[in-house]
Each structure stands twice: as structure tokens, then as C-alpha cells.
């Protein structure tokens, strides 16, 4: 089924309102899910609507987000999310950091007691759109063993950086500290293909080329010890600096119950405090053009700068609509009906 | 030959003094090289002494480092290194950032017109020792093609984060955005072994399992497009935000001539501005203990936290001495003799 972004945002907004979320927050949460669809990342899209919904209904995530600043000191702040909605808290933290950057050149917000916020670049893009460079990381529920270990201890703890690129769409990085997305293992299993050594270990921590064993075990960090160390440091910034939970004490969005304990860490730089924004943007345009003009390994292939594919997917989906698989639509509609919310059609 | 850290520092200091470097700066540069040896990273150690030396002698790198702050605005600053010594400039930038963090909770320094500074965690460790979290990245000479490309356009642009860990040695990350160190390809070639697919491409940009072809071509970024995007964003922070060179306009330390154009980006957080340092350190100790207590994949193996191996190597080398290969000693002594500096013995 093909739907417009507006149809999907309205549907999700109504579902969250029915679960007690104030209208503006419901729309923000809906928009963040639909934006992931628009960028071509359905794994972070509307199929997650009721994952968050179940946490709202259990009370593990509070429908009314009462965040507060527990430290408010010029360029820096610490925000307590009080177990509200991760997307709402992350947005407030980013807005705080942007305002502080405009006043001090740099703004930093450490966030405790938040929740899973979806796609990190949904928030860093706000900084880029404000003429700033934005950084955001978060910890997450355990999905990775320490390097050389066997059992899950740390999250894959994604991080994102976004910067304006002049006349081009913002340059945006948004990565987890894993070698590959879990989805690629599911694809390999369905096709009956083996996976390269170095992608995953089985549940005993042994290297495997069997996709099913990898799914039962652990996806490996990128470049082995490098991704392991990066994921730990992102947990230090997100969980420990903020005074939130860390390592194996985080509860993920897939669990309908249990305090999340997720923390985030945001910094925003006001580019104009460092050098004229126009000069920065001219250099960014040069960088984009160097990348685009670089000779491809395979003749005729196009080379992309970070964030370019998402910008293109966004433009295409906004004009052509967002295609949702039938099983996703059926599941969403079943849940909506139970809430008395109008179905997608 | 086994030498003490002091012998090596004295040797390198004397060599740099003979090349016109002021004594304190000569000692700093020497110490940074010897510290890499102590940490067990000889690739960044004293074998590089005269690589930097040749740049000093050609005048590409100025022996007297006259850095200046071109922006000095509270929590942030922009430093112009004026083509001085990268190690001296990075140290000054880190000290500036620590002082600003102590005053504002956060300190940021963007650096332009610097040079190759060796090992990033030499500087971030200073922040950890001051009760802060330190971040440092730099751009570097082109060593990586854009993802899907064939020719070198961007550096491997390493980045480092360090944090105090209470009673344990600081937790430290220091990584380049590549899947593997170039040295591993040299080892494979010497042994006549093939390399895993995904480590490197040949000089036409085609995936290769031949170590020699990989050396002639390019080492790949970690996790493919992820490491590519991360390396570009580190260049945006190091080169473009600071108004320095970026992408293929950087000159590396292996070239005796040519303006480096390297830029850096530093931030330092004063932990105590966010939460009590003792509480932070208690959580860090818990994290270290969770990691160390995690069951190993291979029975009897030990699991390490980031920076632990370096701390152990440091303690061992300080008591047992640093072993240098004969060919490195011969080369160092030949260069020293030409300068009238006392040889290693």
C-alpha cells in the first residue's frame, strides 16, 4: 500500500493521542517514525509505532513527558527525562543545545532517564538546519559482547553528526558501532546464503558464517576491538556522564515493561562562532563536489556523500508516497482498531 | 637493543634541539614518541623521529611553534598553529580546552595550520588526568577512497576519547576509521597469507584478498560506508570547521616537504560540572568490573577494557625497558651522527 507522509503522520499521531500522549508530542513522535520511512529506513519506521505504544500502555514510558534541567549552567546542562518519551526528550535536549550554542558557541546537554529515540539523525539534522554542527549519541539495551567475550553486555550505542553543506542537503552520519545491520543477516538466512567471517559470532561467542547462528548469537562490532571500544565510550558519554543507566542495565524498546534508563549526550557547535558560516558552507560544497567528482571503482557508478541517499529518498517518497508491506499495514490497523483509531486505507 | 624510556627521550630531545627546536618543545615531541613505544605502538614511536626531522630541516614544519588564538570566546577558541610542530600545537590546544572546561563545563578548540601529531590519546589522556573527558580528532593525508571510489581522497582521520576510571587506568579509545591497520597487510604479505575480503581494494578499487595488491591499493574504511562517512565527518570537524585544509589537500608526515594543512578538533568536558566526579568514577569502576567479569568466548582468556592493554604495556616497558629492532637503532644512530648528536648505546 502506498501512503502519503501526511496520512501516516496523522495515523500515528491519532494512535498516540488515544494512548494519552499530548497532541504536539504525539505528532513529534509520529513525525520521527515517518521521517525514517521517508529516508528509506523502514526498520526505524512506522512498524515501531506500537512497540513504543506498548511501553506507553504499561506505564514503563510516561505519556506525559515531564523533563527537567537538573544542571543549567551556561554552555552545559543535564536533563532528566523522568521516563518520558525518548523522541520528545531528545528533541528538547537538541533544542537546548542549539540555544546554548547560539549563546556560547558550544552547547552540551547530557540526558538521563530517557528512552529509545529512534533515528539519531532526526535530531542532529535540527542542528544542521540551524547553521550548527550537531552530535548526538545514546546508549541502548545490551546487544554486543565485550571483545573476546560471549554474553551481551553493551548496546550498539549509535552516534550521529550532521553539518550544513551549503546548497546541498546536510551532510549526515548516523551509525551504530556494529559491522553490519542485523537486517542483513535476516536477508542472508532467507536466501540461504552464508555470511562473511567477521560479521557475527554464535551464542557461544565462536565466529560463524551461518546467518541463523549469528542471529542467535551476536552481531560483531565494526573492525572488532575498534567498534567495541567506541560503543563503550558512547555509553560512558550517554549513561555515565549523565548519571543514567549503562551497560547491561538498559531496557530496550522491544520490551513492553521495565524502566528504560537510556541516557543521551548532545553537543552543538555554532559554526559562525568559529568562522563565517558562508566560508564554512563554501568549503562543504567543495568537499561534496570532490566526493561526487571522484572516479568510481565501477564505471558508471555514482559516489555519494554521507546523507545524500537519505535526502534523495526523502524527495522521492514525498512525491511518490511511502510503500508499506501489507503485513505491516494489517498489524498497524489491528492495533489501531483496538484503540478506536481510524485505520490506514 | 633494550633502552630505558629516559634514554630514548634524551636521545630524541637532543636530536630535535640540534634541529633548532626549543628545549621544552623538543622534550615534548620526544616524550610523545617514546610514550607510543611504552604503550606498545612502535608504528607511532621513535622510528618516526627523523620523519618529523626531515620536515623541520626542509622548513615545511617550523622548529619554533608560534601558535596563536584567532578566536578566543569563553568556552571556545580557534588556534592557528602557523605550521609549527603538531605535537606542540595539539598539547597547547588540549591545555586550552581543559582550562576552558574548568571555567565553563566544556571547552572546545578548533585548530588550523597544524601538523601530524602522532598518537591522539597522548593528548586526550591529559584531559582524563585532569578529571575531564577529552575528545580529539584530526584530519590526515589522503589514504582512503570515498566509498565506491577508486582514488585516495580523504585521510583515515583518527579520533580519541579518554575518561578517568577511578582506581583503574583511564579508559581510552584511539582509532582510525579503517577496518585494519596497514601493518597487518605487511604481516600477511611476509607470511604469504591472503587477507580477508573487506580489508582492502587493489589500485583499481576492486576487492582483493592479496595483501600486496591491497598495499598498492587502499585499506578499506571500517564497516564500509560507516567508516567512510565517519572519516569525512572527522575531516569536517578538523579541517573545515577550523578553516584549515581538508580532503586531498593535506600533506602527511612522510613527505619531507609541503605545508601540512592539518587541522584538529578538541573538546573537553569537566565531569564535575555534570555530576560529582566521585559518583562518575564509581560508575566507571563498575563498568570496568562488568567488562572484566564478563565470560570469555575462549575459556581462560582475559577480556580488556579500552586502554587497559596500553596501561599494562606502559608499566611493563617502564620496568623492563623498550626493545628496539637493530635496524631502527642503526637508522636512528646514522641520522644522529650526521647531526652531531650522541648515539643510542
Image (cartoon, coloured by chain):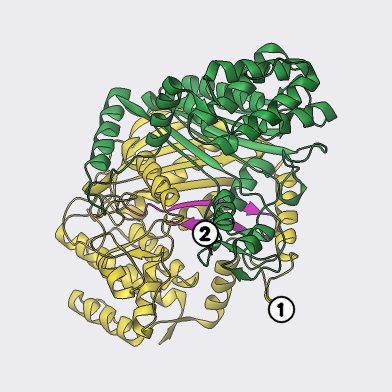
Chain colours: A green, B yellow
- What is the x, y in percent for residue A56? 78, 27
**Residue A78 seen:** no
> How many numbered marks are there?
2
Instruction: Give the structural element (helix, strand or loop) at label 2.
Output: helix
Nearer to the camera, A50 or A193: A193
Subunit of label 1: B
Q: Position of residue B124 (x, y in %)?
A: 50, 52
Instruction: Find numbered disc 1 in the image and state the secondary structure of the residue it sits on.
Output: loop
Quadrant location of the C terminus of chain B in the rendered image: bottom left
Measuring 21% from the left and 60% from the top, which residue is drawn there?
B56
In the drawing, does residue B21 fall left or right of residue B124? left
* Residue B192 numbered tag: none
Left or right: A177 as drawn, with respect to A320 = right
Q: Residue at x 56, y 21 (%)?
A: A95
Q: CA distance from mark 1 to mark 2?
A: 22 Å
| Residue highlighted by disc 1 | B300
Residue lying at 41% horizontally and 58% vertically, measured from the top left? B178
- The magenta region covers B155-175
In front: B181, or B171? Answer: B181
Q: Is residue B56 found inside the magenta-colored segment of the image? A: no
- The answer to whether dots 1 and 2 both sit on one chain is no
The answer to if B173 sits in the magenta stretch is: yes
- Give the answer, above or below, for where B82 lies relative to A82: below
Left or right: B192, with B341 as reference point: right
> Looking at the rendered structure, which numbered label has been put on residue A226?
2
Amino acid at each position: 500500500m502506498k501512503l502519503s507522509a501526511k496520512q501516516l503522520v496523522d495515523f500515528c499521531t491519532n494512535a498516540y493521542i488515544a494512548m494519552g500522549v499530548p497532541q504536539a508530542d504525539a505528532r513529534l513522535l509520529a513525525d520521527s517514525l515517518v521521517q525514517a520511512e521517508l529516508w528509506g529506513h523502514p526498520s526505524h519506521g512506522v512498524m515501531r509505532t506500537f512497540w513504543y505504544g506498548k511501553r506507553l500502555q504499561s506505564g514503563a514510558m510516561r505519556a506525559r513527558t515531564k523533563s527537567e534541567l537538573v544542571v543549567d549552567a551556561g554552555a552545559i546542562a543535564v536533563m532528566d527525562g523522568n521516563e518520558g518519551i525518548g523522541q520528545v526528550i531528545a528533541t528538547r535536549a537538541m533544542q537546548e543545545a542549539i540555544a546554548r550554542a547560539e549563546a556560547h558557541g558550544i552547547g552540551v546537554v547530557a540526558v538521563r532517564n530517557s528512552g529509545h529515540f529512534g533515528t539519531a539523525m532526526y535530531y542532529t539534522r535540527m542542528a544542521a538546519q540551524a547553521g550548527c554542527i550537531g552530535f548526538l549519541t545514546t546508549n541502548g539495551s545490551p546487544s554486543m559482547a565485550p571483545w573476546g567475550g560471549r554474553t551481551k553486555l553493551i548496546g550498539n550505542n549509535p552516534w550521529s553528526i550532521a553539518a550544513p553543506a551549503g546548497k546541498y542537503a546536510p551532510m549526515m552520519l548516523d551509525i551504530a558501532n556494529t559491522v553490519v545491520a542485523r537486517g542483513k543477516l535476516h536477508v542472508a538466512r532467507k536466501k540461504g546464503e552464508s555470511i562473511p567471517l567477521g560479521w557475527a559470532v554464535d551464542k557461544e561467542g565462536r565466529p560463524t558464517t551461518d546467518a541463523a547462528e549469528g542471529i542467535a548469537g551476536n552481531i560483531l562490532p565494526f573492525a572488532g576491538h575498534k567498534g567495541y571500544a567506541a560503543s563503550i565510550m558512547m555509553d560512558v558519554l550517554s549513561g555515565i556522564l549523565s548519571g543514567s543507566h549503562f551497560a547491561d542495565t538498559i531496557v530496550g524498546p522491544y520490551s513492553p515493561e521495565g524502566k528504560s534508563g537510556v541516557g543521551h549526550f548532545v553537543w552543538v557547535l555554532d559554526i559562525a562562532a568559529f568562522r563565517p558560516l558562508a566560508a564554512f558552507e563554501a568549503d562543504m560544497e567543495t568537499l561534496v563536489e570532490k566526493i561526487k567528482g571522484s572516479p568510481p571503482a565501477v564505471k558508471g557508478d555514482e559516489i555519494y556523500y554521507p546523507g545524500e541517499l537519505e535526502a534523495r529518498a526523502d524527495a522521492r517518497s514525498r512525491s511518490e508516497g511511502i510503500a508499506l508491506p501489507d503485513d505491516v499495514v494489517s498489524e498497524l490497523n489491528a492495533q489501531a482498531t483496538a484503540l478506536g483509531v481510524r485505520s490506514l486505507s
